[in-house]
Amino acid sequence: MSTSDGDAACLLDVTALQAALARFAAERDWERFHSPKNLAMALAAEVGELLELFQWQTEAASSELARTPGSARAVRDELADVLLYLVRLADVLGVDLDEACRTKIAANARKYPVERARGRADKYDAI
């Protein structure tokens, strides 16, 4: 993927999801509980639940987890929970996730130039 700071193409449009989550919270009078701290903690908990599905799996088994009938639904549910809390947190904080992603991809492209990073897993300051 080639991207620069000047790229204006939208990579991620979560406005409908943000509206649905805000509506969901409002209907239940949960906005008062959706502080950045609480949402960040809930996000971390959901990431932990996702990690738990992969814990102790071999590399091969972890690659198949989302396609295995016994675990596929759990993987999809935990991925959805992570995304939902992330989008809600960004909305509450007023963070434009599309802009944040475009900026971060551009920064990573500068940080990990293809000619130095291709096929390597070293930490960026070790290459």
Image (tube, rainbow, N blue to C red):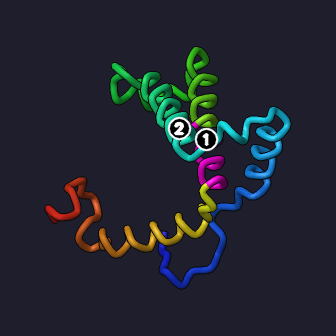
Give the quarter of the image for residue 57: top left
Label located before the other in sequence (2 or 1): 2
Where does residue 97 sit, x and y in percent of width and height? 59, 61
Where does residue 123 sit, x and y in percent of width and height? 21, 57
Amino acid type, callout 1: Tyr
Q: How crowded is mark 1: few (under 14 residues within 10 Å), some or many (20 or more)?
A: many
Closest to the observer, 57 or 28: 28
Q: In this view, does 96 lie to the left or right of 23?
A: left
The answer to whether 45 is drawn above or below residue 56 in the figure is below
Using the image, tell me which numbered label, if any, was put on residue 85: 1
> Which residue is rendered at x = 26% and y = 65% of the image?
117
Extreme residue toward the right, this view: 27
Instruction: Tell me the SS state at disc 2.
Output: helix
Q: Which residues are the magenta region?
A: 82-92
Where does residue 7 sit, x and y in percent of width and height? 57, 80
Instruction: Tell me the SS state at disc 1.
Output: helix
Q: Is residue 127 left or right of residue 82?
A: left
Circles 2, 1 touching at the beta carbon (< 8 Å): yes
Quadrant position of the C terminus in the picture: bottom left
> Which residue is rendered at x = 44% and y = 73% of the image?
106
Extreme residue toward the left, this view: 126
Q: Name the residue under label 2.
A: 43
Q: In this view, does 69 lie to the left or right of 16?
A: left
